[in-house]
Image: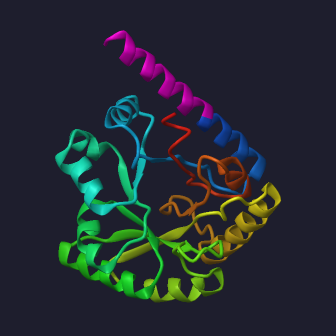
Amino acid sequence: MPTAELTRKSALLTNFKDITGRIAAASARSGAANPKAELLAVTKYAADEDVKILIEAGAIKNAGENKVQDAKAKWFNGPLAPLKSRIKLHFIGHLQTNKAKAAVETFDWIDSIDSLKIAVEVNRHAEAAGKTMPVMIQLKLNDSATQSGIKPGQAGELLAQIRLLKNLEPRGYMGIAPEGATPAELKTVFTEAKKIFDRDFPVTKTGAPANYLSLGMSGDYELAVEAGSNLPRIGSSLFA
């Protein structure tokens, strides 16, 4: 391997080690009742070669993309296609109904269900494809007019409706913190989301499929994990 590639690999693995160390420390601070946190690598803006390096090193187990067509081109027809079987690919963007079929075909998880309408559409295409799709519901944790998600107070009702759709498997909640929030404000938002998650996805038995509270990104993942997030989504810090 050329020197430049070795240097880049070293930098990426150093980033990974630092981030996972910080996640482990934050998880330990959160208390024994919280499940161990996993890293979801946001690969949408990352160089394909960087992603390849981390997958081949065994560092990336979960990857997140927010555009259906771009992800399909990258992971099924592009340079990352030979590595697709080594990761779980999560859709983390706003999903439109006309992209539901391609999303079901492309992704292993859809983390951003925000209405019964899109849930029904995803279920329809999952049934046609003969698969059961793990999904998460996106909580709207801020007042931004452009931010997707369902209000936390309506999450339980949507979850109950999704649980009636036979080809969807609800596995938790995802949320994006308010932009520019202070640490105290972030802690409040994350703690409220954790209360909803604990209410709707209680730990029932050892060996059951893992459920996820996906909160936290590069700028706030330690606070999120400390509050109980077990699937932080990290891109810029990992691929810096």
Residue 35, located in which quarter of the rendered image?
bottom right
* Residue at 67% from the left image edge and 70% from the top image edge: 193
Q: Is residue 28 magenta?
A: no
Q: Is residue 115 left or right of residue 74?
A: right
**Front residue of this view, candidates 91 and 213:** 91
| In the depicted structure, whether residue 20 falls above or below residue 219 | above
Magenta-drawn segment: 1-18
Counting labels gives 0
| In the depicted structure, whether residue 139 falls above or below residue 68 | below
The single residue placed furthest to the top in the displayed view is 3
* Residue at 56% from the left image edge and 89% from the top image edge: 157
* Residue at 37% from the left image edge and 10% from the top image edge: 3
Q: Is residue 3 magenta?
A: yes
Q: Is residue 87 left or right of residue 78?
A: right
Q: Position of residue 210 (x, y in %)?
A: 51, 60
Residue 129, located in which quarter of the rendered image?
bottom left
| In the depicted structure, whether residue 103 falls above or below residue 115 | above
Q: Position of residue 64 (x, y in %)?
A: 42, 53
Quarter containing the N terminus:
top left
- Is residue 163 something one can see in this rendering? no
* Residue at 53% from the left image edge and 73% from the top image edge: 146
